[in-house]
Image (cartoon, rainbow, N blue to C red):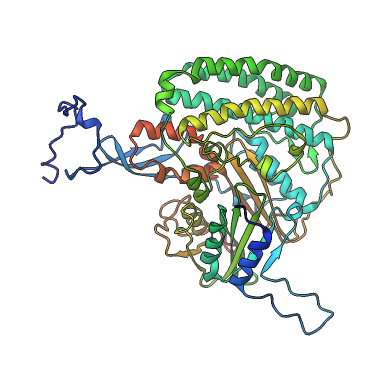
Amino acid sequence: MPGAECQVPNDGSVTGAAGVPQSTIRDPQSTIPQETFVLNLGPQHPAAHGVLRVLMTMDGEWITRAEPVIGYIHRMHEKMGENRTWAKFLPNTSRIDYLSAMHYTHAFVGAVERGAKIEVPPRAEYLRVITSELNRIASHMVWWGALLSDLGGLTPFLYAFDDRELILDLLEGLCGARLTYCYYRFGGVCNDADDDFLRGCRQFVRHMPARLKLYHDLVTGNIILRKRLEGIGPISAEMCRKYGATGPVIRGAGVAYDVRRVEPYSIYPQFDFEIPTFPQGDSMARYLVRMAEMEQSLRIIDQALDKIPAGPVMGKVPRVLRLPPGDYCYAVEAARGRFLVRIVSDGKDVPYRVRLRTPSFSNLSLFEEASRGMILPDALAMMGTLDLVIPDIDR
Amino acid sequence: MNPTLEQLCEQFGRLVGPAPAASAAPAAPPAPGPVQRTDHAAKGYDLDVSVAPLQVVMAAEILDRSGFGLDAVTGVDWLAQGQMEVVYDYFHPTTPLRVAVRTRVPRAQPEVPTITAIFPGANWHERETHDFFGLVFTGHPNLKPLLLPEDATFHPLRKDYQS
């Protein structure tokens, strides 16, 4: 039997010199042959947030190789983009990352507006910024609740969803949808904001800081959370660059990379906000980045509400939209990182090619390298701080 | 140290050779060179580099040395010309520079070398592009279906694909 000479039983009954159960220590220099086994996480697993499967080769508690297997809910959005008009493809873009729909539609309308040279009225740009930032806060709230329930604390989820409901109600009043918004249109937005919406936003901006403080008081300093996240799952800036990981993952590695600042789009240069970064690169850093980002989003909304001008919300758009031949890119900072749309037009009224570069895809692709040698619960905590949305990976 | 557009133009110029000689007929507009500066506000990227298929690895090395990150790899099927285009998008984490590197291969033999040795993130992007277009990335460590079923033999984004 090949593993018979393995002298350390896995029940922790043998203790080492220091009284520490040996089975909890894996000596990298050990020459004792170790038997590995394959652990199939998913495709239906509560910690995977959807149909993600991770094929893990385990050495006891340690991961020797964790290969994500994706594509279970692949819908071929890019093919759908090639057989319908530009406008008819727009609702598809809100169904890729269902928690970040405003940003995704923003990138697609941005690319088309860039190609067709459509001007967007200022009021529409302000409404886009307000709704994008509301969407970002709502998305981070889902992440916060889901991460903590992954880590065993189920109550914070209810606090987060309580506040998220306020955002969903506001956005529902504005555009009719609660999740898969199709509010942005080529040339503007489909519906002007009424006083109720703007007043509601103002109330929300006043309401949230105390709630965020409550979140921190209840959770951030908690010793169990800190033990689960601090120093766990380090991801370096170099690894982010090599894998194209963006968003809170790269900002949690100390790089102030935010599309809103580095490659400004819409009217973001007009606002005063910070790009929170934390240099540690561990799971806690990614946690703190997202928590700080919610505050910054509130700042942006507050300024936008002060400055929003009156006027039309739709620009002049040709009835049949045809883009000049060529390719056009548009990147936005979605809740999970850089979302890039690359469209290729051959001058017809349907796209020749639509490429959707999604942040979760690149953020998950580093998981195999980053999780090597970690114990399973730590790897799942790290996965929680990557904030994966599976339809965003599979498209 | 952040790269500048001039430095990149010069490095890519050395890679792809000098711009083609001016056309004999003076009335004809000059043919677009392989290294083109583009207007970010109009196109969404600053530099458009066309390279030969075997040069994509060297192009990736240039961008890697300059601190760029890999954004995406994708294909475009130009059925009428009998060609497949592979487009590599790169972003820079601290400057607004965006670079698109592109190459074209014949549809009959769609092969380009892999850049996974330089950017490991290209692994999944190249697998996906292989799924959708049947492009073969030579030297790729694991070129099996990523998003399509594991036994898929079709390439849905080819323009002659019939479902």
**Relative to A257, does residue A48 appear above or below in the rendering?**
above
Q: Is residue B32 left or right of residue A222?
A: right
- Left/right of residue A50 with respect to residue B49 in the rendered view: left
Q: Residue drawn at (56%, 42%), measured in percent from left and top?
A: A246
Outermost residue to the bottom: B24
The x and y percentages for residue A134 are 67, 28
Query: Residue at position x 51%, y 15% from top?
Result: A218
Would residue A222 appear left or right of A251 to someone viewing this image? left
Q: Is residue B79 visible?
A: no
Where the N terminus of chain A falls, by quadrant? top left
**Residue A111 image offset from top left, x and y in percent:** 72, 49
Q: Position of residue A176 (x, y in %)?
A: 71, 28
Residue sitting nearer the eye, B110 or A61: A61
Residue A53 locus on image (x, y percent):
40, 40
Give the quadrant of the C terminus of chain A. top right
Residue A156, placed above or below residue B78:
above
Judging depth in this view, the residue of A209 and B105 nearest the camera is A209
A207 up-or-down from A69: above or below? above
In this view, which residue lies farthest toward the front? B1
| Picture mark count | 0
Q: Nearer the viewer, residue B145 or B156?
A: B145
| Image quarter of residue A164 | top right
Residue found at x 42% / y 58% = B143
Horizontally, is A261 left or right of B64 in the view? right
- Residue A208, visible in the rendered structure: yes
Q: Quadrant of residue B85?
A: bottom right
